[in-house]
Amino acid sequence: MRIKMLIATVDTEYTFLISDNMSEHHADMIEVSVCNTLESTQEALTRRKYDVALIDSVLFGNVDSSTVRLPVLLWSEQDDTAVTSPELIRINKYQRISSIAAAVLECYAKVSMNRQGFDSKSANITAVWSPAGGVGKTTVALAYAASKVSEGKDVFYLNLESFSSIPGYFTRSGKSISRIFEMLDSPEGDVKMLVQGICCHESGISYLYSPDNYDDICILTSENIKELITSCASLTDELVIDLSCVCDNRSRQVFEIADKVLIVTVQEAPADVKLAQFISQNNVFESIKEKTTLVANKGAIITSPPVGSVVSLPNIRSSDETQIYKVLSGISFGA
């Protein structure tokens, strides 16, 4: 679904600047029309129904925008406008156009009722997990994601850890994933559109920024997780999901959906013991065994692997985790 957007402002140069950028970078989501006069704006709103209309302060109070699902006031601090409705959504026109597009997608996602595709997915989904902490699970997850970027894939990294590692690996912050969590519990809104609107991009990897607080992710249900994954998977070629070191119902939901599971371990007694317990005492392992690859991280040597597919990663000594995952991304993770 593409959003039908009208951009109406008397500033002709600005109109074509924003419309050209939207058409070039967001054509898959937004279909843009433009107007520069009161007469052409009135005619456009009469002739066609728009999902979103960005209208400047000169035109806003003089046109009937009641047929637009999401009318938005384009404003600047220099504007002298009498438009004061508290319900009106305002977007500052003088900011990065990518930020304007993100704000529009976020706002429209909240009023949209489109939850289609809940039971479908398009991306190849890889879950990265370990029964033990401190084994380099997130570094491996990002190394795998970066390896797919090097193959020319569109890659989305979804961090579902109880305590997010995102700020330790990415320099760009963004709007919190908690905004999406709020929508998951609402019967209204378009989760996919909101994901696309607020996701960040760095080193070829798309990602959602950390939750506002610990409880936001801990209260998610298995169905919440399923909808979130389905929405993210519909936007990319490869979805890499970084899980917490627990095997609860939410993790099981991810294992079930995933096409591939990477279980990360190291050559340390606690990791060995916990992996052995997972294999022998948890019935989940048998259900995912055929799609599981064991990742022996930090130079670990696995003498009797529980699965046929094993990837061995060297021990790279560095205090920069970002540098480590980028180096590891050059190693084959198999088919």
Image (cartoon, helix red, strand yellow):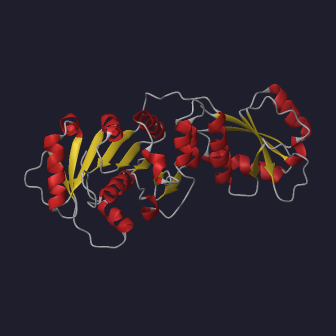
Horizontal placement of 96 versus 279: left or right? Answer: right
**Furthest residue in direction left, as rendered:** 303
For the point 24% across and 55% down, the residue is: 132
Residue 313's quadrant in the figure?
bottom left
Q: Can you give x and y, in whole percent of width and height, for residue 109 in the image?
A: 62, 38
Q: Can you give x and y, in whole percent of width and height, for residue 20 in the image?
A: 70, 48
Confirm whether residue 213 shows in the render. yes
Horizontal placement of 249 versus 192: left or right? Answer: left
Q: Can you give x and y, in whole percent of width and height, for residue 174 in the image?
A: 56, 56
Confirm whether residue 30 shows in the render. no
Q: Can you give x and y, in whole percent of width and height, for residue 210 in the image?
A: 49, 54
User: Looking at the image, which is closer to me, 80 or 213?
Assistant: 213
User: Looking at the image, which is closer to me, 89 or 52?
Assistant: 89
Residue 5's quadrant in the figure?
top right
Q: Name the quadrant of the N terminus.
A: top right
For the point 63% across and 37% down, the residue is: 110
Horizontal placement of 300 versus 238: left or right? Answer: left
User: Looking at the image, which is closer to me, 87 or 36?
Assistant: 87
Q: Name the quadrant of the C terminus.
A: top left
Horizontal placement of 206 versus 88: left or right? Answer: left
